[in-house]
Amino acid sequence: MHTDFDRCVRAARSKDPRFDGWFFTAVLTTRIYCRPSCPAVLPKDRNMSFYPSAAAAQQAGFRACKRCRPDASPGSPRWNERADVVARAMRLIADGTVDREGVPGLAARLGYSARQIERQLLAELGAGPLALARAQRAQTARVLIEAGELPMADVAFAAGFASVRAFNETVRAVFALTPTALRARAGRGRPAAAPGVLTLRLPFRAPFTPDNLFGHLAATAVPGVEEWRDGAYHRTLRLPYGHGTVSLRPLPDHIACRLALSDQRDLAGAISRCRRLLDLDADPEAVDALLRTDPHLAPLIDKAPGRRVPRTVDAEELALRAILGQQVSTAAARTLAARLVTAHGTPVETSGGTSGGLSHLFPSTEALAALDPASLAMPAGRRAAFTRLVTALATGDLDLGVGSDWGRARARLAEIPGIGPWTADIVAMRGLGDPDAFLPTDLGVRRAATALGLPATPGALTRHAAAWRPWRAYAVQYLWSADDHPAARMPGHPREGL
């Protein structure tokens, strides 16, 4: 979009927050870059330039606006909608891969040379992987500076900088303030945080209906790993450097996030996973506009627009839980998963008041691969499928990571005996994040389809749903919302009519 000058000018002058994250406006006279919705008075058209990423604007010598904080805008929806190499690279960079493994590690995960990755990112985003990672480090540093009380040297290394000098130079270049001044500026009027806890605001694009999102997470929560408590969803996180706990509370204009991490270097990855879990970078206007063209779905969308797909912080965990949930009720699946967690999960010590009933990390595939399959209390067929999946994940034969190839991963899932279409589709939708994944055999989908006058058989429904592409995963959310199930409404809210 950034190459269409007139369209970008119109979007910037409208100050429409829906365009935040799609492109960035740079002001040539002040050398400041902003998000499209910045409330400041815009300059003349000839004094504006547009960039596809914050990294590209920073690389061109612009600093972030102190008023609209463009570095904190919602992420571009493109990276969660697409399955090409650029989108996969952006998901991996957001997860911290460049900071942990460097550009060679990023390239190896994608199966390309470092030179090819550099060329493709430069062509589309105006910045290479190092510049994109640097922009993310700057944003992580800002969060640590403003939301916590860590010494600046600790902030520098936790944010991924190789030295305190590089940290100081980057913060000054991007924000036009020293780290100390940035903390002093943010601290005015800020309530004191609990020790070891970071309190953040996770933005999203409106409209946003959180009912099915948090309803689904609460209804399927595994005791010890997840819980709904005091109006918020809580869970433990397995992260590259350690572990953490998170609390996510829906508010009208953002998600209130409280993070407690055993290692602050995991901050960027933890934020990325929480945004991915709640599908916060989605473009609901584009999704709803297409789905609303179907008269069967239009009333559901008009009633509660902006539904998101409940995803996951760990695709391997979700895939294993999908096997446990085959042909049993939601309550039975939770019970099976809770037993697995108690017997084989990793106990964690939590702090900062975010823990509640959280006590374990979900078992790792390495730990499960070492088990005697006979010790797993489940039917023989499901136990065999579970064991095959564990082996495929533990050996690397199946990659469900954030940078995985969706088509290849889904095809490999389908090759594992005992994993049918429903399981493969639910992993594609919630684990891989494919926005076009569809569940034509799901009982709730078929029941809603019948009630709405849609075709109810899987084949006929799939043919009808071709018009919903590439947003069929969102159509599933609207269909599920038509069903009377706790997962379709905000936890604690009564059924309509009662």
Image: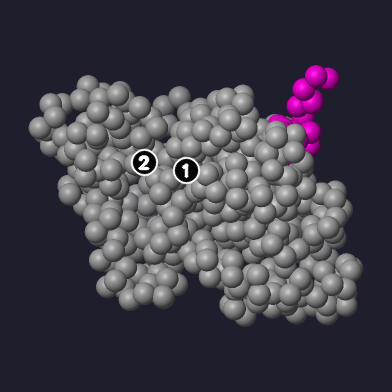
Q: For label 2, count other residues whose C-alpha is less than 10 Å away and answer few (under 14), some (14-19) or many (20+).
A: many
As helix, strand or loop, the secondary structure at mark 1 comes to loop
- Most foreground residue, 104 or 188: 104
Quadrant where the C terminus is found in the figure: top right
Q: Which residues are magenta?
A: 482-498
On whether residue 331 falls in the magenta region, the answer is no
- Most foreground residue, 30 or 143: 30
Question: Which residue is at 12% across, 26% downward?
Answer: 44
* Residue 321 falls left or right of residue 73: right
Type of amino acid under label 1 = Asp
**Residue 1 is at least partly visible in this image:** yes
Using the image, determine if residue 319 lies above or below residue 274.
below
Q: Quadrant of residue 67?
A: top left
The mark tally for this picture is 2
* Residue 452 falls left or right of residue 22: right
- Most foreground residue, 264 or 36: 36
Type of amino acid under label 2 = Gly
Q: Position of residue 224 (x, y in %)?
A: 77, 52
Q: Quadrant of residue 70?
A: top left
Residue labelled with disc 1: 281
Q: For label 1, count other residues whose C-alpha is less than 10 Å away and answer few (under 14), some (14-19) or many (20+).
A: many
Using the image, determine if residue 273 lies above or below residue 72.
below
Residue labelled with disc 2: 21
Nearest to N terminus: mark 1 or mark 2: 2
Q: Position of residue 409 (x, y in %)?
A: 57, 68
On whether residue 487 falls in the magenta region, the answer is yes
Circle 1/circle 2 CB separation < 8 Å: yes
- Most foreground residue, 152 or 62: 62
The rendered magenta stretch, by its main secondary structure, is classed as: loop
Question: Which residue is at 28% across, 47% downward?
Answer: 52
In 3D space, how far apart are the residues under numbered discs 1 and 2 (Cα atoms)? 9 Å
